[in-house]
Image (cartoon, helix red, strand yellow):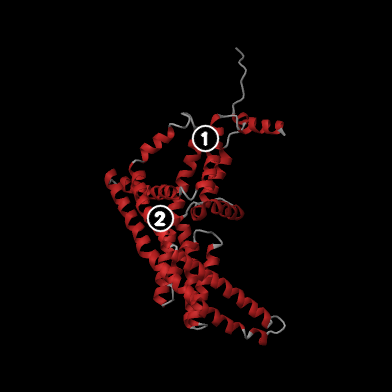
Amino acid sequence: MLDIFKKWSRTYLFEEESVLLLVLLAISVALLVTIGDILAPLLASIVLAYLMQGFSSQLQSHGAPPWLGLALSYGVFIGAFFGFTLGLLPLVWRQLMALASELPRYLDQGRQLLSVLPERYPEIFTAEQINELVGMAQLEAANMGQMLVTRSLASLPGLFTVMVYMILIPMLVFFFLRDREKILDWLAKFLPEKRPLLRRIWGEMNQQFANYARGKVLEIIVVGSVSYAAFAWMGLNYAALLGLLVGLSVIIPYIGAALVTLPVIFVGFFQWGFNTEFYTLFAVYVVIQGLDGNVLVPLLFSEAVNLHPVAIILAILFFGGIWGLWGVFFAIPLATLIKAIINSWPTRDAISANSPEPTISME
């Protein structure tokens, strides 16, 4: 066993930079697993500053001075940040509480609809099965209502944390935007002077990572806004809550759209039943999903990520498990980063194959 490990290390860890990269990856994963919640505001600020840096760079490329690009990008961030936290989130929370209070009525309507199944299809459904299904749904609804009440009663310490985050995150984003070069120069002091592997991986990932993150944020905003506008125009209950869910569903490929379809269809059915409004809602929702998958995604992500669907799902499960929502959001670029590291990792065999063969001089 020891000989196998020595052979593996001589093949893959024969360079100082390879060992350093392996140590950095191990430390990053360990920090996310152990104290990821504590570092959440710092990590969120880094991501948000990274997103706004692209906007600032675009302004500077069109002739704006650096201070103006910084001021405008930070102003856009502040407007979006406080508009979301002070405007949208309270509205969504109120609608979520209202939906929880309406769940018993929805379950009673569902029980009445399901009660006809044993009469029409006695060979498939029985009254005991329907009662058991309704009882399970009522139990889950009661647990969810109790959880919401508990969260509301315990919201005082959580409110203090939210206030700290609302002050801390804008401050961190400002300093990350203003002192970006200083921070990067300070971090570079801990790295080797010659680091071709790190430069190659960073050069390969930086543009793709930035395009994916900014494109995904724009996709969430567009899909969520269009969904909310369509639901509100149709008079659908809980339009803000459902619009936010539809917008966030684009974070999870293949799964998000399927999961968010259920609450949209259920709310529409219990509000209108099988009539014209319900079928119109279903058609509008299908059009929104179709335009997102066939128009918006190809437009925002012109360079497709060359990953197998199984690799994408595994990345979502892994990074979502250790980093929560941020891990789900960045699962695809992080998986692409791992793929780039694997493809770029130096080995003795590859270096020997690429090195020129010695020539024999006849002089």
| Picture coordinates of residue 177, whole percent (x, y) | 35, 45
Image quadrant where residue 346 sits: top right
Q: Nearer the viewer, residue 251 or 34?
A: 34
Instruction: Name the spot of residue 2 as percent of width and height, x first.
Output: 70, 32
Left or right, residue 152 beside residue 141? left
Q: SS for tag 2?
A: helix
Residue assigned mark 2: 161
- Asked if residue 138 is positioned above or below residue 5 in the image, the reply reads below
> Sequence-wise, which precedes: disc 1 or disc 2?
2
Looking at numbered disc 2 in the image, what kind of residue is underneath it? Thr
Say which residue appears at 34% left-offset and 54% top-offset: 77
Q: Residue at x 51, y 80 (%)?
A: 105
Q: Residue at x 36, y 38 (%)?
A: 181
The dot on residue 253 is none
> Residue 18 location in percent, x, y?
56, 33
Specify the quadrant of the image occupied by residue 22.
top right
The answer to whether residue 349 is seen in the rendering is no
Q: Residue at x 61, y 20 (%)?
A: 359
Secondary structure under tag 1 reads: helix
Q: Say above or below: 69 vs 295.
A: above
Q: Is residue 240 above or below residue 178?
A: below
- In this picture, residue 342 sits left or right of residue 176: right
Residue 39 in sight from this viewpoint: yes
Q: Please state the total of marks drawn on the protein image.
A: 2
Disc 1/disc 2 C-alpha distance (Å):
40 Å
Residue behind mark 1? 197
Q: Residues within 10 Å of mark 1 (few under 14, many from 20)?
A: some
- In depth, the one of 217 and 176 nearer the eye is 176
Q: Amino acid at mark 1?
A: Leu
251 to the left or right of 186: right
Labels 1, 2: front one: 2
The quadrant of the picture occupied by the C terminus is top right
